[in-house]
């Protein structure tokens, strides 16, 4: 037989952006990290181009290549951590809904 859930359990389990947001079930950080990545990409590239124009060719090339690469790796690591969090939440929700 199906178990009946009380009203608070039903409301909590429904996909509700604000409820999930307020209870830290939904993270906004991955979105902010992507914005941060693109801003950093532009700033690092401009910094490297300015260095190239000033005659610091090696430094400018290093900034453009290694700076953007390291910035990308940091952002990917952060997004990976939040992705793990979201997947764990989906596993938890799946287990809760398929409990016998």
Image: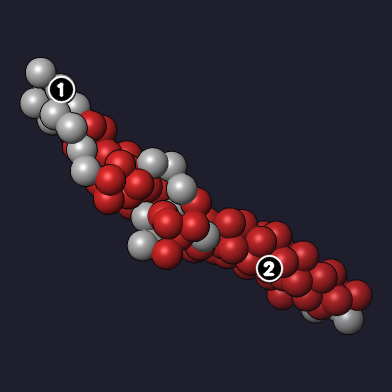
Q: Which mark is residue 40?
A: 2
Q: Residue at x 43, y 42 (%)?
A: 15
Query: Where residue 50 sits: x, y (%)?
Result: 85, 76
Between 72 and 38, the one lying in front of the other is: 38
What's the distance in space between the residues labelled 2 and 1, CA to CA?
Answer: 52 Å
Residue 19 in sight from this viewpoint = yes
- Name the side, left or right, on which 32 lies relative to 60: left
Residue drawn where x is 59% and y is 63% of the image: 32
Using the image as rendered, state which of residue 33 and residue 75 is in the foreground.
33
- Neighbor class of circle 1 (other Cα within 10 Å; few <14, some 14-19, many 20+) is few
As drawn, the label of residue 78 is: none
Nearest to viewer (mark 2 / mark 1) = 1
- Quadrant where the N terminus is found in the figure: top left
In front of the other: 39 or 55 = 39
Kindly identify which residue carries mark 1: 2
The C terminus - image quarter:
top left
Q: Position of residue 94 (x, y in %)?
A: 25, 33
For image coordinates 57% across by 62% down, the residue present is: 33
The spot of residue 12 in percent (x, y) is 32, 49
Which is more N-terminal, label 1 or label 2?
A: 1
Q: In which quarter of the image is residue 95?
A: top left
Q: Which residue lies furthest to the bottom in this view?
A: 54
């Amino acid at each position: 037989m199906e178990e009946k859930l009380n009203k608070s359990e039903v409301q909590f389990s429904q996909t509700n952006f604000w409820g999930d947001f307020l209870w830290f079930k939904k993270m906004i950080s991955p979105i902010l990290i992507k914005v941060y990545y693109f801003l950093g990409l532009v700033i690092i590239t401009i910094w490297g181009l300015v260095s190239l124009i000033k005659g610091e060719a090696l430094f400018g090339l290093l900034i453009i290549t290694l700076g953007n690469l390291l910035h990308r790796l940091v952002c990917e690591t952060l997004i990976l951590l939040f992705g793990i969090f979201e997947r764990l939440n989906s596993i938890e929700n799946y287990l809760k809904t398929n409990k016998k």
